[in-house]
Every structure is written in structure tokens, then in C-alpha cells.
Image (tube, helix red, strand yellow):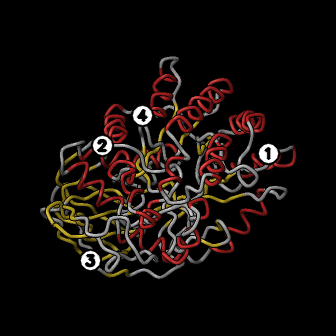
Amino acid sequence: MSLLIKNGRIITADADYVADIFIDGETIKAIGEDLPMKADKEIDAIGKFVFPGGIDPHVHLDMPFMGTFSSDNYETGTRAALFGGTTMVIDFVLQKQGNSLQAALDEWRSRSDNNCVSDYSFHMAVTDFNENTKKEIKGMVEKEGITSFKTFMAYKGALMIDDRQMVGLMEEVKQHGGLINVHATNGDMIDYLIGKHRSEGNLSPLYHYLSQPEVTEAEASERFSDMAYYTGCPGYIVHLTCEGALNAVRNATRRNQKVFVETCIQYLILDASLYEKNFDGAKWVMSPPLRQKKDQETLWAGINQGLVQVVATDHCPFKWEQKLMGKDDFSKIPNGHPAIENRMELLYSEGVHTGKFTLNKYVEVTCTNPAKIFGMFPRKGTIAPGSDADIVIFDPTEKHTLSAKTHHMNVDYSGYEGWEITGKVKTVLLRGKVAIEEGKCLLEKGYGKFIKRSKVDSKI
């Protein structure tokens, strides 16, 4: 089926112009003013912005955690992503200690394959780096198209690796053209503080926040940057939240090192005062926790300075009954909050509409940089002839209110309940097919395709 999008204002990371887009099959065939082509379907986008489909490189769907699973599976989560203008997600495969990377990938594929509505890929989380694991890295990159490897500097006994393993993994991943993603917080210090607060009878959600002070993230970000500098391996810090951690990255730039940084929408617009709402604060229990207003200012500045390249979500939803597992002990609250559907609209409203950054920067951090960093550009992340026809048609003036009553995520509360925003996703295309139109999803599960990724370009 061919499509013609007429008169839209096309925004990419480096351009802003009005033109038509002709799509035939899964890709964009032509862009220009007053295109003469006839199409099976025509969409008038006059007065609308036309963005590349959003890429969220940090989600956790159907993920086992603390004896339960995140409440969005691959069908509900990727459908909700499409409603919010995100056409591609990258999830995390978690290796079980003692098992192979391949076994972990097989387990995750048993849940994801033929169930995704949007396109998807995986990062491989390495929790047990040894001689056998080392031999699997090359195949993950070259055969499976998984070029990014996640490490945890926290969650001791389950996910955390030590610095010896980190350096060994970095050296192997560098050799095969991959990248290391890191959860950079000091797990030993956090575990000490959790134990201290529990022993003193301090069990409310506020103490989740107080168990992960800024120094735990700043120290780990500095240490990770030093190890990446020593090995020469490209490094990417996920969900960076605070001034101290971003200053560690600033320090790295002084020696001409490039460390990629991702923050998440919640850290830009929510703050730690939410933890003072008694147990209701459990809705925002995530790791790292929400921070202070000064950290929000730092992150917005970091985006404009080019120190923060990506805004993701760390979407990891749990229903309220699951959050209640920790009603008597903050350390038993499942970590995570829902945002996969809200990212693009919230970031436009709070970033572009308020004048904090430009339209081009908006597309850069939500679409183009994730595609470049994770080896999918220019297939994904831009609007250009030959690129996949992943397109969002966006009304920049429509006002609406976020609510659990109207969102499509499989969770019974919203972290942004009653939040009034300006800017609304109207129509979404995924590889040339209309995915979202007039408030309905027109694609079935299984349309989403696994995207094999190329080796990392650390020079963006």
C-alpha cells in the first residue's frame, strides 16, 4: 500500500521544512514540495509537525523482578508505545548467573517473538562474565545483531558484576565493535544504607530515596567512566539523574573522552518531594530515585550542552497490588514506573512548548541519537528517502490531560495523573503501515519486527 503525507512540517535533528512524503511499501521513497505521485491513501498534515518515529532504548517488558513480572507484556507495552509516538523499543535480556547469554536470549524471545506491535531490539545484560560468556560476545554482535551489553554496578547477588568483570567485558566488547550500557550506582553503599534504615524502623518509600543519595550515583559514574577510558570501550550511562553524576561525565570530557548519557522523562519533570506522600510515594519508587529541582536544571542544561544525548523512560510498570508488596518495607516495593506512552508528548510539552529546547533537539534526543548510538541509523531515527517509514504526525496545539483512565499501558495508575499537556500524537506509521489513527491501533501483535543492529559508531 502506498501513502502520501501532504503539507506537513517535517522536523528532523537537523532540518525543519514543509513538504510531502511519498511512501511505498515499508520505506520512504520521495520527499518534496507538491509531489505528483498518486497513492492508495493520502493524509493531509497541514498545520501538523511530522517527526520520525520515537525510539525508546530503555524499557522492561514482561520482566521478572522481586518475585513478580512487570505488568506490561510485549503486546500491551509496544501498543502503548505506538499510541505515544514511539515506534521502536530496546528491551533488556537479563542473563541468569551461572547460565549462558544464549539461554537468556532464548527465554526473552519466548515472550517477545510474535507478540510485539512496534519494532524492537534487545540489549544483553551480562551478570556473570566468565570465560564461557566471553566466547558468546562475538556471536551476539555478528549473528544476533545485539551490539550493546548492559552491566549493573548495583543489585549484588543478582545482577551486579565487580570491576574485574567489568574491565574484562569492556575489553571483549570493544574488540567486536559493541558498547557497554551501565546502571551506575554504588551497590555496596546502597545495600549498607538500606540495611541501616530498616534496622532503625524507617520503612516508608522516603527511605528508598534516602538509601540512594546522589554520591552513590556520582561515584559509580566516575568509576565507570575511568574504566571505559582505560579500556577504550564506548560507554553509555543509562537513566542518569543528578548533577554529581553528570559532573563525572564533564570530567571525562576534559580528557577528550566521549561517554554517552541517557536520562529519562521522569527525572526532568518530577522530584523527590513525591516520596513524602506516605505509601502513595511507592508509585515513583524506581532506581535511581527521583532527585531534586537543581538536578532537573542540570539535566535540561546537559541536553542543550550535548552532554545528555538521549531521553528514554526506563518503563517498568507494576500494578498497585504489586507495589503493595512493600507496604511494610520500602525495600520490597518493585522498582519502576509507567511512562512508555507518555514520553514523546510530555517531553514536547515540557521541553519544546516551554522553550527549554528546540524542535530539532527534541527529535535528536528521542529519535536520532538512539538510532545512531545503537546502530540503526539511517534506517531508523530520521525522515529521508530509503529510511523506514516510521512517522509521527503531531498536533502541536492540542491540549489534553494524562490519566490512567485513558492511557493504554497495562497499569492501574499514572505517574502523571491529571497532568495537562500541550501537543498530541494524532497519527503514527510503522514501516509504511498506519499504526495509530483516530485514537485506535490498527496493527495486530506480531507486526513488530526484531531489528538487528550494526556495530556501534562512537563518534556521533
Quadrant for the N terminus, please: bottom left
Q: Is residue 28 visible?
A: yes
As shown in the figure, which amino acid type bears the numbered disc 3? Lys
Q: Which residue is mark 1?
A: 129
Residue 308's x, y, as percent? 41, 38
Mark toward the start of the polypeptide (4 vs 3): 3
- CA distance separating discs 1 and 2: 37 Å
Task: Identify the disc placed on residue 41.
Answer: 3
Along the line of sight, which residue is nearer the eye, 207 or 69? Answer: 207
* Circle nearer the viewer, 1 or 2: 1
* Circle nearer the viewer, 2 or 4: 4
- State whether residue 213 is above or below residue 335: above
- CA distance separating discs 2 and 4: 21 Å
Mark 3 neighbour class, 10 Å CA radius: few under 14, some 14 to 19, many 20 or more? few
**Residue at disc 3, secondary structure:** strand
As shown in the figure, which amino acid type bears the numbered disc 4? Glu
Along the line of sight, which residue is nearer the eye, 281 or 261? Answer: 281
- CA distance separating discs 4 and 3: 49 Å
* Circle nearer the viewer, 3 or 1: 1
As shown in the figure, which amino acid type bears the numbered disc 2? Lys
Residue drawn 23% across the image and 63% down it: 394
Mark toward the start of the polypeptide (2 vs 3): 3
Q: Residue furthest right?
A: 131
- CA distance separating discs 1 and 4: 31 Å
Residue 216's x, y, as percent? 56, 38
